[in-house]
Image (spheres, rainbow, N blue to C red):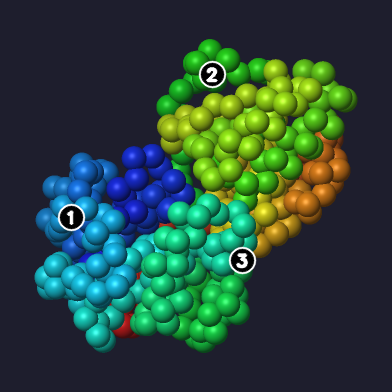
Amino acid sequence: MNIAIDARPLLERRGTGVYEYTRHLLDALFRISGNCFELFSNSYQYPLNLPENWRGCEKIKIVETKHPNKIFNLKLAFFRAPKLNRLIGDANLFYLPNLNFCALDRGFPYVATVHDLSFEVMPSFFGPKQRVWHGLVGVQKLLKGATKIVAVSEHTKSDITRLYKISPGKIQVIYPGLNNLSAGKTPEELRLRHFLPENFILFLGTLEKRKNVLGLISAFELLAQKIPDLHLVIAGAPGWGFAEIYARAKASKYAERILFLGYIHEDERMTFYSLAKVFVYPSFYEGFGMPPLEAMSCGTPVVTSAASSLPEAVGDAALLINPHKTDDLADAILACLTNDRLRKKLISAGAEQIKKFSWDKAVRELNDVFRKII
């Protein structure tokens, strides 16, 4: 079986959640599956950001075109050309690890993974360019034409059926695996490099309004009055609404105790999580929510939202709060900071919860989807 894969998520220069999902999923797929694969990408400027061992693997063929992206995407959207299965060659099936512009011959089988429909559920958290992009992709039409849809959570599956009127039988939930983080930096190196305080709570993720970082800053201000040495460390690449988030923090009475560290490389994340007293992820909406599980894997207690898919991901291994209630968020963080019995309970439950998620399991389930189609 020859499977074509849309590798355009791997054009990212920095590892977004979709980039990491695609890279880790494909790494396990190439290792476990006996199929042959053709990776397709288009970029006028950038080559695919691939691990070196992929480029030398006999069962992986790489097809990269060099058209200007805007023109290429508009042709796919309005003229349904070029047909990607013809550009690739001998594939039996096309797989999209994320929603993207796509045109295939009529009847050519394809599978699409949906991470979330936040752009439909909460459009106000997206900028004009993002809303136009999703509109041009034609997500509903893309999913209705798919042979099979993979959803990363039951919550995402429910959104697809509710918003797009697609039969639940067409959608299979396959949970992502948990990335194995490695300690590339020692705690001492990380503290010196980033001037980290001893006592801090951590947020790590794309800095956008959907993640409720503004609510976290307000909750921190309540805590800062009670705990004089407590700091808030906010780590992640800027997203839509970052300027408002940054301005809000700088206007705070406790601005000198709020640190912005920018994007954190994967080889530093394990140490960051481990040094934090509490990991806080009060997002309004997530398709799955990997950072809380990563924090659990590092032995850090987690406070997150009782919203969208997050309860599904963390189970009973985190304190769940209403993301719209700042007082509840502050109280939950304070409990994690001061209640040793609670901390030990959450850390122990987190160690068990993360065992439910593995890339090998995800790949076996995805392979079963492919086999049933071809």
Residue at 33% of width from left, 66% of height from top? 101
Query: Residue 332 sits in which quadrant?
Result: top right
Query: Given the image, on which type of amino acid does mark 3 rest?
Result: Val
Q: Which residue is mark 1?
A: 67
Counting residues from the start of the chain, the first of labels 1 and 2 encountered is 1
Q: Nearer the viewer, mark 1 or mark 2?
A: 1
Of the numbered discs in the image, which one, if any, rests on residue 99?
Answer: none
| Category of crowding for the residue at label 1, using alpha-carbon neighbours closer than 10 angstroms: few (below 14), some (14–19), many (at least 20) | few
| Residue 298: % across, % down | 58, 37
The answer to whether any part of residue 260 appears in the image is yes
Query: Given the image, on which type of amino acid does mark 2 rest?
Result: His
Q: Which residue is mark 3?
A: 121
Query: Residue 122 sits in which quadrant?
Result: bottom right
| Residue 81: % across, % down | 21, 72
| Residue 352: % across, % down | 63, 51
Q: Which residue is mark 2?
A: 194
| Residue 314: % across, % down | 65, 54
The image quadrant where one finds the C terminus is bottom left
Seen in the picture, residue 147 relative to 333 is either above or below; the reply is below
Query: Residue 112 sits in which quadrant?
Result: bottom left
Seen in the picture, residue 95 relative to 14 is either above or below; the reply is below
Alpha-carbon span between mark 1 and mark 3 = 33 Å
